[in-house]
Amino acid sequence: ATGGNDAAPIAVLGASGRTGALCVASCLRRGLPVKALTRSGEWPPGGKIDLKSVDFDGEVAGNPLLTISACDVKDAASLASNLAGCRGVIYAASASKKGGNSKEIDFDGVVAAGDACLLAKVPRYIVLSSGSTTRPNSLGFKFTEMAVKGIMTNKRLG
């Protein structure tokens, strides 16, 4: 366990998505060591994610606080090696066309990452999900469940 070791990184699973990228950028802006974990092993993500919204200047090369690694939440060995020595884990991964369906990512992946945290004695595990997850009768839950079959149910189970 890392306990109060401030030098130990915070791992962000799903760092190439919008929420995960903002988590990584926010950690860096605060001077916290962070491990950006993505399927590809590349960060920052391209596209429409505006990291300036969390005052991140985009400086990645040579940043001693940032480690970038490939990690697959469907692979227990990948999780174990990437989460070992971390002081906390933020799970921001979600189902996508490229990465896996909602059962694989939003349920099985959440559980597998939690198991890896327990084995590695990571003291904090945070799962970020949809606010509607806890309100299955809400319009947000029902609409999202209909748009991406099973995603909200799997988020809720995870």
Image (tube, rainbow, N blue to C red):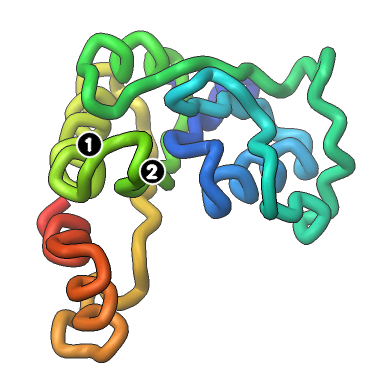
Q: In the image, which disc is placed on residue 109?
A: 1
Residue 116 percent across, percent down from the top left: 24, 23
Confirm whether residue 58 shows in the render.
Answer: yes
Q: Which residue is mark 2?
A: 93
Foreground residue among 118 and 20: 20
Residue 48 percent across, percent down from the top left: 69, 54
Tag 2–tag 1 contact (CB < 8 Å): yes
Q: Tell me what residue is drawn at x 41 percent, y 15 percent.
A: 82
Between discs 2 and 1, the one toward the N terminus: 2
Q: Tell me what residue is drawn at x 64 percent, y 37 percent.
A: 45
Left or right of 42 in this view: 140? left
Foreground residue among 122 and 133: 133
Element type at marker 2?
loop
Residue 117 percent across, percent down from the top left: 28, 27
Q: CA distance from mark 2 to mark 1?
A: 8 Å
Q: How many marks?
A: 2
Q: Residues within 10 Å of mark 1 (few under 14, many from 20)?
A: many
